[in-house]
Image (cartoon, rainbow, N blue to C red):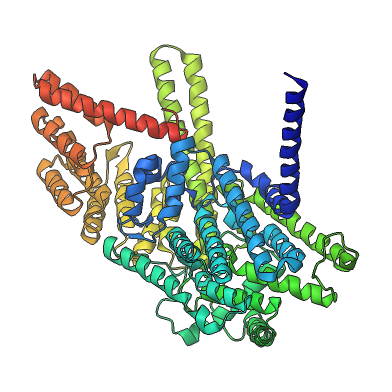
């Protein structure tokens, strides 16, 4: 290479370095904010799945496991489903983000946490840019301080650390983008920004509708920080309202009707008048303000009785009423001054009041994630008031400016305290057990927290019990092979595993009992308390708890099922029926459960088994299953049970027909498809044999893809 060429290459390199340095100088504050998010929330990236993550991922959402192929179904379905198959909520963009993630990378909790942190970092940077536009370049430091406070605030740990809360993060992201687009249209008059504003409004609503208040406040913000007339800016609400109405109309006419029944411990305000809700609303608002000022205790779920029913005699309610009435007066004064704090207060109040329960029932009565957007207004007002308290004129100041020295130390201390609190809270969100065990100490009166910990311990116990049975079966095989030392060792392992399982079941009772004490109408807690006795083979003590659940909820099919199973065990001694009266009780509860809920196929399955096993009554068993097929045509369980009965009578043809019907209802059972293929090949029906063989191979491939994406091994 000639010296001239080398010189030219060096000049190009210097130019590129100069451009990069110039870009960094212009955007250094944004870069600092972006990196600080990873410093403060980075330890949460190493967490596992936690609360409700299975709603979107963790191997439990069939639509997201399909990857991008599941997106059309995502946009035409409700997001969450009840046990009876009814659904509620519509957040297709949030769900689709997981489908895309799983398509590209599979299910990896650390990656999901990383994406959450990255989205939050992007939100912080965009918010900083938006506020710098609102406040003016001369108040860049003000925008930076607000962004810093928002970044480190511990109240955001639920939103960032809970993978499921990506819906909140995406809605926040699109809401900020919408406000930026609205502001740019206000400044430039370019209608493409209004088009983008509408687009981002729709995206925010399709991520989560909790962003609706901020979308309506966006035109207000554009008016507040510009010289435009309010009459003109009020027209900016038109496209926002049209977008909201369009989304609502689409949901109403293209999706099944939403159905979400909240139990009393979640929100006991059904049928309560607004006047009666008022003291509770002020209590909740006071708690939100407390958490924003002093973020302790932070709890993943509040609910009854952690949030008590409102009473005007409650000191927190009284304090909340006085403080918020005072805030209303201060907001009016600051609004008339058109101060930065005035906007912050309007933004805070406009967003937090929506979650006071006055305008709709909030799940759990309150939640930290509900304060995410309102905290922006809180941070704006707080920083402005702090600067005024120190009599600091923020205009044209930088972090190292001598005029900022008075408050710099105070901000550093505040930011450090909040950062340390956030980092510590991130660790609590490591997994369900660390979260539940930590927060049950903070919220011992929360029925839901106690219930969730009890359920988690029961699930761990059930897994240990299953492993114990597997080890015992292996011990029996070893015994048959004559390997007595290995068999004895396996038997001892099975005994220890079972003892461990029983210990977990016993521990779970403590939390189920507490849940029922806090909320005596918690019928699922009563039923779960019974199952904790049932699985420790204490059937007699289990019965009263199942009956208590039925006393509370007469049509609670699961409790009837549990009673049927309990009475079957009580009727036997050494696997031989010794009490026919108790066996009749078993039959009665199964039948009564089916009367209450004919679609509960587990009761039909077990009742048909009881008829066959103890009464040798195939006619009664088949009648039960035929009725179950009519009541729940989407279940393959009755068809499978019918096939088993036919095989007991060596009617392989009828058994195969029943299995075919089961395969029509649920074509994903590969083992069943292979059995049908083998049967028809043996019968000489090669066409059907090949059909089920090919279908089984196809399903195996699909399931292998899903297993790979979910990280599960065969």
Front residue of 544/7: it is 7
User: Could you tell me how many numbered marks the image carries?
Assistant: 0
Is 647 on the left-hand or right-hand side of 243?
left
Quadrant in which residue 500 is drawn: top right
Q: Position of residue 8 (x, y in %)?
A: 73, 29
- 410 horizontally vs 676: left or right: right
Q: Position of residue 288 (x, y in %)?
A: 62, 71
Task: Decide if residue 570 is on the left or right side of residue 36.
Answer: left
Front residue of 381/417: it is 381
* Residue farthest toward the right in the current orientation of the protein: 402
Taking the image as drawn, is residue 37 in sight?
yes
Which quarter of the rendered picture does the N terminus lie within? top right
Whether residue 462 appears in this view of the structure is no
Q: Is residue 288 above or below residue 497?
A: below
Q: Which quadrant holds the C terminus?
A: top left
Judged left or right of residue 675, residue 209 is right
- What residue appears at the point 64 percent right and 75 percent down from the top-left corner? 225
Q: Position of residue 493 (x, y in %)?
A: 52, 27
x and y percentages locating residue 246 in the rendered image:
35, 67
Determine whether 209 is above or below 562 in the image: below
In this view, the residue in front, 483 or 651, is 651
The residue depicted at 51 percent of the width and 48 percent of the height is: 456
**Residue placed farthest to the top in the image?**
482
Above or below: residue 194 compared with residue 63: below
Residue 318: image quadrant is bottom right
Residue at 73 percent across and 24 percent down: it is 5
């Amino acid at each position: 290479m000639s010296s001239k060429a080398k010189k030219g290459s060096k000049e190009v390199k210097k130019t590129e370095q100069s451009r990069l340095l110039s870009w960094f100088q212009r955007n250094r504050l944004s870069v600092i904010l972006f990196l600080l998010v990873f410093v403060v929330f980075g330890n949460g990236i190493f967490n596992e799945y936690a609360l409700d993550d299975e709603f979107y991922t963790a191997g439990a959402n069939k639509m997201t496991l399909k990857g991008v192929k599941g997106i059309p179904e995502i946009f035409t379905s409700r997001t969450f489903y009840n046990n009876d198959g009814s659904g509620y909520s519509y957040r297709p963009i949030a769900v689709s983000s997981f489908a895309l993630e799983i398509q590209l990378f599979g299910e990896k909790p650390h990656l999901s946490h990383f994406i959450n942190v990255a989205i939050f970092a992007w939100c912080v940077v965009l918010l900083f840019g938006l506020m710098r536009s609102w406040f003016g370049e001369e108040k860049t430091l003000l925008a930076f301080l607000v962004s810093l406070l928002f970044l480190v605030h511990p109240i955001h740990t639920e939103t960032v650390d809970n993978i499921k809360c990506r819906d909140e993060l995406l809605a926040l992201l699109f809401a900020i983008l919408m406000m930026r687009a609205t502001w740019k249209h206000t400044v430039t008059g370019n209608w493409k920004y209004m088009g983008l504003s509408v687009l981002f409004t729709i995206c925010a609503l399709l991520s989560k509708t909790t962003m609706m208040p901020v979308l309506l406040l966006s035109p207000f913000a554009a008016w507040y920080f510009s010289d435009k007339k309010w009459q003109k800016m009020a027209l900016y609400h038109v496209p926002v309202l049209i977008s909201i109405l369009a989304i609502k109309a689409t949901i109403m006419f293209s999706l099944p009707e939403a159905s979400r029944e909240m139990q009393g411990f979640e929100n006991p305000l059904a049928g309560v008048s607004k006047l009666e809700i008022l003291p509770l609303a002020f209590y909740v608002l006071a708690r939100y303000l407390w958490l924003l000022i002093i973020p302790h205790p932070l709890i993943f779920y509040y609910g009854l009785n952690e949030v008590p029913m409102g009473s005007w005699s409650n000191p927190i309610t009284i304090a909340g009423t006085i403080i918020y009435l005072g805030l209303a007066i201060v907001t009016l004064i600051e609004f008339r001054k058109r101060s930065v704090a005035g906007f912050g207060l309007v933004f805070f109040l406009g967003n937090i009041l929506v979650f006071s329960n006055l305008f709709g029932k909030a799940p759990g009565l309150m939640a930290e994630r509900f304060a995410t957007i309102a905290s922006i207004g809180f941070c704006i007002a707080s920083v402005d008031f702090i600067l005024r308290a120190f009599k600091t004129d923020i205009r044209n100041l930088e972090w190292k400016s001598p005029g900022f020295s008075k408050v710099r130390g105070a901000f550093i201390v505040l930011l450090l305290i909040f950062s340390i609190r956030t980092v510590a809270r991130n660790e609590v969100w490591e997994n369900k057990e660390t979260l539940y065990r930590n927060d049950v100490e903070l919220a011992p009166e929360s029925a839901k927290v106690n219930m969730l910990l009890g359920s988690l311990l029961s699930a761990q116990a059930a897994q240990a019990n299953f492993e114990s049975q597997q080890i015992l079966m292996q011990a029996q095989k070893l015994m048959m092979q004559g390997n007595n030392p290995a068999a004895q060792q396996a038997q001892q392992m099975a005994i220890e595993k079972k003892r461990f399982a029983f210990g977990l079941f016993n521990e779970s009772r403590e939390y189920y009992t507490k849940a029922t004490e806090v909320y005596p109408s918690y019928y699922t807690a009563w039923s779960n308390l019974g199952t904790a006795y049932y699985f420790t083979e204490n059937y007699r003590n289990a019965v009263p708890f199942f009956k208590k659940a039925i006393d509370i909820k007469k049509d609670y099919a699961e409790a009837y099922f549990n009673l049927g199973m309990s009475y079957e065990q009580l009727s036997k001694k050494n696997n031989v029926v010794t009490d026919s009266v108790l066996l009749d009780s078993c039959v009665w509860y199964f039948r009564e459960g089916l009367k209450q809920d004919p679609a509960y196929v587990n009761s039909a399955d077990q009742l048909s088994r009881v008829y066959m096993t103890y009464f040798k009554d195939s006619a009664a068993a088949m009648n039960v299953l035929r009725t179950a097929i009519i009541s729940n045509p989407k279940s393959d369980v009755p068809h499978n049970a019918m096939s088993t009965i036919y095989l007991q009578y060596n009617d392989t043809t009828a058994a195969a027909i029943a299995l075919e019907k089961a395969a029509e209802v649920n074509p994903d059972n590969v083992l069943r498809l292979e059995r049908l293929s083998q049967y028809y090949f043996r019968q000489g029906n090669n066409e059907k044999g090949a059909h089920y063989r090919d279908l089984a191979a196809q399903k195996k491939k699909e399931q292998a893809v899903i297993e790979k994406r979910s990280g599960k091994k065969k």
